[in-house]
Image: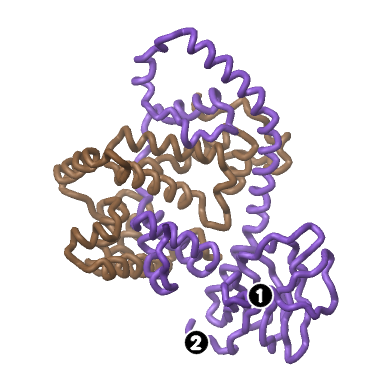
Amino acid sequence: MAPSLTHHELEELLGAYALDAVDPDEAEAVELHLRECPRCHTEVLTHREVAASLAQVGSAAPEGVWERIAGSLEEVPPKLDMARVVALKPRREIGGGRPRNWAVAAVSIAAAAALVIGVLGVKLIDQDRRLRTLTAAVDSRSLETTAMAALVDGAARRVQLKALDDKLLGEAVMLADGSGYLLRTNLPTLPVDRTYQLWAIVGEDRISLGILGREPTVTAFKAAAEVRALAVTDERAGGVTTTDKPPVVLGWVPAAKPRSA
Amino acid sequence: MPYTSAAASSSEDPDVPGEPLKEMSDQTLVVAIGRWREDALAEAYRRHAGAVFSLARRVLSDLVSAEEVLQEVFLRLWNQPEKFDAERGSLRSYLLAQSHGRAVDLLRSEGSRRRREEREARQTAEAGYDLEREVWDLTLASRVKEAVAVLPQDERCAIELAYFGGHTYREVATMLGQPEGTVKSRIRAGLKRLRSALTAADLDLAWPQA
């Protein structure tokens, strides 16, 4: 059961969490928090990159491990969850025990063959799914990088997008030239006939900044300097030109002068 | 032959550019792994296995367990390449985080008391470890070393014990006779200080910089 921690307490745990140095219940609490707090999420990733730079010790991998890995790839259909079934014993220890009962072994082989046939169909579908995920990740990489660079811009204004109950569901960053980025959000996926739409609130007006789709990812937008707030609404697919709907999330834009670089 | 494969050629992979594997970025390589290309996994292994293994060995002080971790980390990459999210940083840091997490799990798992005692005995015999020794032999070692030297002793010690020692911050606090909250803060502050120092040294941390 994850303990209930304040944001400050969670923040204080981020360094230790990134080094796997917290207790399991604290890890659970941090993980829950990271899903809804892009800033803390970014901090953990940064800590891990730092830790990785410490760990870059230059010794070579030991002999023989690749052969064991490659051997496992041939023997077990990839769709299987091998994280749990990995044969971790060094090769020299394999072969010491032969099956006590050959009949049992024969049944196992037959069962494995049936499993392979069953898995092949699944594998094709699974391959498409994981490729879609991967190519999407690569495509969004450059935009993500640009957006992250914007975050560290000294003049950047960060906008926290919150639901009515004050829950943080996303973050945007706006630069002095009016360009902005919607960062990772935690908005629930909408049905296929709906879309999220991003709005700038300028004075009393709502100006559409773009259609975000039903699963918003990192998005670039352009807004006038005098934007008071950003809002996201839930609209019919295709978007609308004007809206009276209450925002799903709203974030006030801080004053142009940043408090700190 | 460890680094060859009969897997599909790149011409059949619309999502994978037809460039040689050795010139592919890590991200493209992972897409190729998503296509079940064993040669792509072999290339990822060639690039990162040394670091993945070394970190696990450092934490576990045990060759056989570290080999287990190495094997597991790369099989996981093969089976679930989509778990690597390019938005979440470099492949290297992803694999190292996996390696570290798994090594720490082994260390803390049930029945691991003896493993830990043995390990501590070995470490005593090897006169302990420290960050400076960890990074001495790398091309970028001098820069990392300079950055580490910027750390106050307290922060450095807390990070060493947590990261390379595989201890929780509470354990570190007990070992150092310091309050838990202090240790927790020092780890975080130390990591931030290191990042500033590494950035100042112009070391590319791959993410989230442009």
Q: Quadrant of residue B14?
A: top right
Which residue is label 2 attached to? A259
Determine the colour of chain B. Answer: brown
Task: Please state which amino acid type lies under the numbered disc 1.
Answer: Val
| Residue at image location 44% in from the left, 57% down from the top | A28
Is residue B55 visible in the rendered image? The answer is no
Determine the colour of chain A. Answer: purple
Give the percent coordinates (x, y) of residue B5.
58, 27
**In the current view of this chain or complex, which residue is farthest to the top?**
A102
Q: Quadrant of residue A175?
A: bottom right
Give the percent coordinates (x, y) of residue B109.
32, 42
Sequence order check, earlier mark of 2 and 1: 1
| Residue at image location 19% in from the left, 39% down from the top | B118
Say left or right for A82 vs B69: right
Q: Are marks 2 and 1 on the same chain?
A: yes
Q: Which mark is residue A249?
A: 1
